[in-house]
Image (cartoon, grey):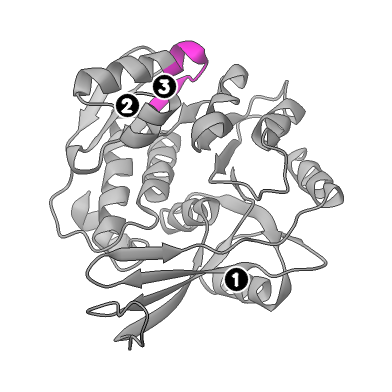
Amino acid sequence: MVYTVTFNPALDYTVNTDILNRGGITRAKTAQLHYGGKGINVSAVLTMLGVPNKALGFVAGFTGRELEAKLNADNINCDFIRLESGLTRINVKIKAEDETEINAPGPEIGEDDIEKLMQKLGKMNDGDFLVLSGSVPKNLPADIYEQILGKLEGKDIKIVVDATGDLLTETLGHKPFLVKPNRTELGEIFKTEIKTGTDVDNYAAELQRMGAQNVLVSLAQNGAMLLDEGGKIHRVSAIKGTRVNSVGCGDSMVAGFIAGYINTGDFEYALKLGNACGGATAFSEALASKEELTKYL
């Protein structure tokens, strides 16, 4: 079983227009409301791929109820903790001559709520996967990921971390199964600019020396690379197509990689499937469908 955790899920309100009239009225051509949040995106793609999973996290208010309803409608297994106050956030994605995102703050999560999450995670079994991805609300401790991994110490659980900066590096002492920065995030971790493929290889190797078992780096138009636990580097080129979406591509890659690894135990195939999932989402208005994935795979 794969468990995902999303501390700050959202409803994503996506509007499409030819030109964004800043300071005036813009009339949208189309508008859609989707569920959002990095862990939720991973769960959605895993469900599409037929991999058993459960989405954990926090919801609040009428927007939280709508989020759960949309997930249930797509047969995505979720077990959220309902907060007593606040609202699950609504993020606005404006697709015009370029993409603009307005991400709202989420509801406050209390200590009792965190304890409820810990209790749910405590029921995980050896061999399960846990995906920790995305940012955390400002009222939570910055080392919340590390706290979670500390609670799971001693269990044979494969940890996947898709986060930035200290949120990622502070998990490395727990030897996560996989970390997935993109090229920019990799450079930010080491306070440098990643200019070449050799730079990617070297800094991925540094993350491995710091504790990561496998390092997957998404490289946008240059595809992706994986440094596996045996020290072998795998590369895959970017899929050709017209990019229409930047939301959920990395999450789709994570889900595809996990699914590929669970089904085959083959790192090369896992990277290939992850790349296909990421590309299919990039070329779709929302998360990729099974039909689009099959085409790009």
Is residue 154 left or right of 104 when viewed as pictured? Answer: right
Q: Quadrant of residue 232?
A: top left
In the image, what residue occupies the spot 27% across and 80% down?
17
In the image, what residue occupies the spot 40% across and 55% down?
248
Magenta stretch in the rendered image = 207-215
| 175 or 99, nearer to the observer | 99
Q: Amino acid at mark 2?
A: Leu
Q: Earlier in the sequence, mark 3 or mark 2?
A: 3
Q: Amino acid at mark 1?
A: Leu
Between the C-alphas of marks 1 and 3, the distance is 37 Å
In the image, what residue occupies the spot 42% across and 42% down?
254
Q: Earlier in the sequence, mark 1 or mark 3?
A: 1
Q: Earlier in the sequence, mark 1 or mark 2?
A: 1
Q: Which residue is mark 2?
A: 226
Q: Does 49 lie within the magenta span?
A: no
Between the C-alphas of marks 3 and 2, the distance is 18 Å
